[in-house]
């Protein structure tokens, strides 16, 4: 994976969108990590779009 632009801080959370459909495989450790992250995400309340925009603007 190539990330362009500013480097991400350690622990940054990202969403990956695939431009093309295709097959890919994860190793067992990556699969476990992905499933754990998905279950943690379901438990979190999250923030509103307005709050997200405010936080992103504050980062500039």
Image: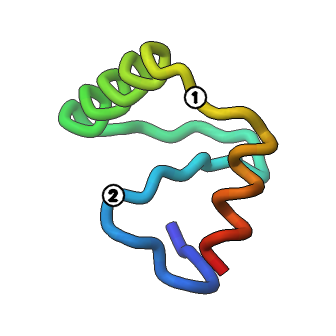
The picture quadrant where one finds residue 56 is bottom right
State the CA–CA distance, disc 1 to disc 2: 17 Å
Disc number placed over residue 36 in the picture, else none: none
- Looking at marks 1 and 2 on the same chain, the residue that comes earlier in the sequence is marked by 2
Q: Residue at x 47, y 51 (%)?
A: 13
The picture quadrant where one finds residue 35 is top left
Q: Which residue is mark 1?
A: 46
Q: Which residue is mark 2?
A: 11
- Indicate how the structure is coloured in the image: rainbow
The picture quadrant where one finds residue 31 is top left
In what quadrant of the picture does the C terminus appear?
Answer: bottom right
Front residue of 52 and 42 = 52
How many callouts does the rendering have? 2
* Mark 2: secondary structure: loop
Front residue of 26 and 14 = 14
Q: Is residue 59 above or below residue 54?
A: below
Q: Residue at x 77, y 48 (%)?
A: 20
């Amino acid at each position: 994976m190539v990330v362009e632009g500013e480097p991400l801080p350690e622990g940054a959370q990202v969403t990956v969108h695939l431009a093309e459909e295709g097959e890919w495989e994860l190793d067992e450790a990556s699969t476990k990590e992905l499933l754990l992250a998905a279950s943690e995400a379901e438990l979190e309340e999250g923030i509103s779009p307005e709050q997200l925009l405010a936080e992103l603007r504050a980062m500039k």
